[in-house]
């Protein structure tokens, strides 16, 4: 597939059930995703009075949060009415640099000055609070159930999720749902413990596909040539999620693959 060198993003809609938007590089992708987030959160607040965003880690995920923190449009969102959750977390101590929640402080610390309600911020529990990842997962499921909205378009006890962000590994894993692991086969429940992760650390907590797929919009944020083979398989949604987890995630209203040119080079 030819790569368009123009800085204008290339949108490809031939993928059934999803929209693919290609940006020239990872930095542009992060900036564009941040701009999209501002609009999506504004739209959700206009519709429902509040907005719910599920965050991800990874280089592009955190790059997007950095770009959002520096956006001049940041004040267009009422951050006192935004709920923040995570798609997965490493089960390590709260102070560990590996934690997605800690890395997200690059944005959260800025939002503190814009009215962010820390009571609406829901990090997954660390290993110095919970004895096992099962305990942390059960606690997260309880939090989700406590915030579940009446009339949500799902049988699972989760709040309305307006946008759920996902990175993707070269092996096609999303959140902490890995190929041929139990989590990739799990639909029931909302949060699970993950053992023996192929990517360290070995213990993690993750949302299930059942919870992920309740989101109104699922956005994949993917950059790098090493991701291109997995992207090429996953974007058509035909591969079994047990083998290609990224193929099993989709939004109820929209699924966006936001890619850089390298990640999109094989589609």
Image (cartoon, rainbow, N blue to C red):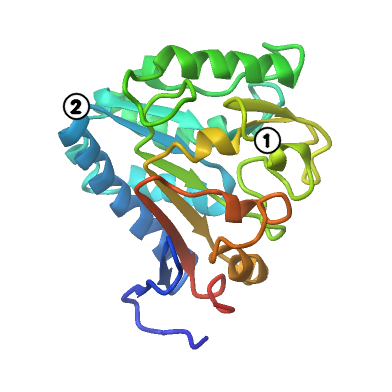
Question: Image check: 54 left or right of 34?
Answer: right
**How far across and down, in percent of the image, does residue 226 sit?**
67, 68
Using a 10 Å C-alpha cutoff, classify the residue at mark 2 as few (fewer than 14 neighbours), some (14 to 19) or many (20 or more): few
Is 30 placed above or below 53 here? below
Is 144 placed above or below 169 here? above
**How far across and down, in percent of the image, does residue 261 sit?**
50, 75
Q: Residue furthest bottom?
A: 2
Specify the quadrant that holds the C terminus. bottom right
Q: Residue at x 41, y 84 (%)?
A: 5
Q: Is residue 87 visible?
A: no
Q: Quadrant of residue 30?
A: bottom left
Q: Nearest the camera: 164 or 239?
A: 239
Q: Residue at x 41, y 70 (%)?
A: 23
The residue labelled by disc 2 is 49
Q: Residue at x 53, y 73 (%)?
A: 264
Q: Quadrant of residue 29?
A: bottom left
The residue labelled by disc 1 is 186
Task: Tell which circle, 2 or 1, labels the residue nearer the N-terminal end.
Answer: 2
Q: Nearest the camera: 31 or 11?
A: 11
Q: Which secondary structure, mark 1?
A: loop
Q: Residue at x 49, y 41 (%)?
A: 213
Q: Which secondary structure, mark 2?
A: loop
């Amino acid at each position: 597939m030819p790569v368009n060198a123009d800085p204008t993003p290339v949108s490809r809609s031939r993928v059934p059930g999803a929209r693919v938007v290609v940006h020239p590089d990872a930095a542009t992708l992060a900036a564009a995703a941040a701009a999209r987030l501002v609009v999506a959160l504004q739209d959700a607040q206009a519709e429902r009075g509040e907005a719910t965003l599920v965050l991800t880690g990874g280089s592009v995920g955190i790059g997007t949060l950095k770009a959002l923190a520096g956006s001049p449009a940041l004040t267009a969102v009422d951050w006192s009415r935004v709920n923040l959750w995570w798609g997965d977390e490493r089960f390590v101590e709260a102070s560990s640099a590996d934690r997605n929640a800690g890395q997200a402080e690059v944005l959260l610390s800025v939002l503190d000055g814009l009215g962010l309600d820390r009571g609406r911020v829901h990090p997954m529990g660390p290993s110095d609070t919970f004895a096992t990842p099962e305990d942390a997962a059960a606690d997260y499921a309880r939090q989700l159930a406590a915030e579940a909205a009446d009339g949500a378009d799902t049988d699972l006890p989760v709040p309305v999720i307006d946008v759920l962000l996902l990175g993707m590994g070269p092996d096609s894993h999303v959140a902490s749902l890995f190929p041929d692991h139990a989590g990739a086969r799990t639909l029931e429940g909302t949060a699970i413990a993950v053992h023996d992760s192929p990517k360290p650390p070995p213990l993690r907590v993750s949302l299930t596909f059942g919870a992920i797929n309740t989101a109104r919009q699922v956005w994949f944020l993917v950059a790098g040539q090493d991701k291109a083979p997995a992207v090429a398989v996953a974007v058509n949604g035909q591969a079994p999620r047990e083998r290609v987890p990224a193929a099993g995630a989709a939004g109820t209203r929209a699924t966006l693959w936001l890619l850089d040119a390298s990640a999109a080079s094989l589609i």
